[in-house]
């Protein structure tokens, strides 16, 4: 690699947040697309129901940001929504918390290594990339679920 490419910044923090929030909007549409019962019960090939996958994303987002900000890594309390409306409310609350916490991330923490949740040795930027990748992965599973019940999944590329 040439020096110009190794020192290039591909995405700044504000652009990354917009990218992540775009994916969160798509995932929200996936939650809305599921019939209530299937959201909490449909499983194919031993995969967890989509509601459980969404709760994993919810449970990782704010605790990860707080860990990146402070270096203190604590999982949030598990929650068990009883309906799609409650799950969407949790999703929206998490989105607002992300927007609130994001500007408080010390800039050096994006490139600083840490042991997230006592398990994963990586930089803040790597953990954030993992969160988005994990959400996309779970949305792909949701696409399989929706197609199995004859529902066309929302377009993954429409992040508005």
Image (cartoon, grey):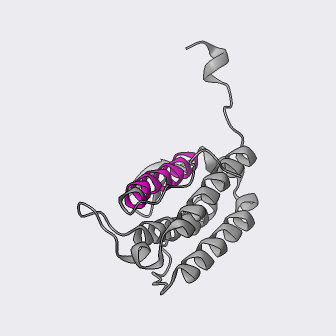
Tell me if I can see residue 7 in this picture.
Answer: yes
Q: Residue furthest front?
A: 150
Magenta: main secondary structure: helix
Residue at x-position 29% and y-position 63%: 47
Residue 66 x %, y %? 60, 66
Which residues, given as a range, are shown in magenta? 124-146
The residue at the point 67 percent across, 65 percent down is: 98
The x, y position of residue 133, in whole percent, is: 49, 48
User: Quick one: 72 or 21, which is closer to the camera?
Assistant: 21
Is 88 left or right of 53, judged from the image as shown? right
Q: Camera-side residue: 19 or 129?
A: 19
Q: Is residue 59 above or below residue 137?
A: below
140 part of magenta stretch: yes
Instruction: List the single residue furthest toward the top.
Output: 2
Q: Nearer the viewer, residue 98 or 35?
A: 35
The quadrant where residue 67 appears: bottom right
Is 149 left or right of 99, judged from the image as shown? left
Q: Residue 1: x, y in percent?
A: 55, 14
| Residue at (47, 78) in percent of width and height | 36
Please state the horizontal and vertical placement of residue 115, each as a whole percent of the image: 45, 56
Number of numbered callouts drawn? 0
Please indicate, yes or no, whether residue 73 appears anywhere in the rendered image: no
User: What residue is at 62 percent from the left and 48 percent from the top?
Assistant: 110
């Amino acid at each position: 690699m040439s020096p110009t490419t190794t020192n290039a910044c591909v995405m700044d923090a504000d652009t990354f947040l917009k990218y992540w929030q775009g994916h969160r909007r798509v995932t929200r549409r996936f939650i809305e697309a599921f019939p209530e019962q299937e959201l909490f019960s449909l499983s194919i090939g031993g995969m967890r129901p989509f509601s459980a996958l969404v709760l994993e994303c919810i449970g990782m987002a704010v605790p990860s940001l707080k860990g990146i900000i402070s270096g203190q890594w604590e999982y949030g309390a598990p929650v068990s929504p009883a309906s799609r409306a409650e799950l969407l409310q949790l999703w929206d609350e998490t989105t607002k918390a992300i927007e609130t916490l994001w500007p408080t991330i010390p800039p050096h923490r994006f490139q600083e290594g840490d042991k997230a949740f006592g398990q994963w040795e990586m930089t803040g930027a790597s953990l954030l990339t993992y969160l988005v990748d994990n959400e996309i992965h779970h949305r792909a599973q949701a696409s399989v679920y929706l197609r199995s019940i004859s529902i066309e999944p929302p377009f993954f590329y429409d992040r508005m």
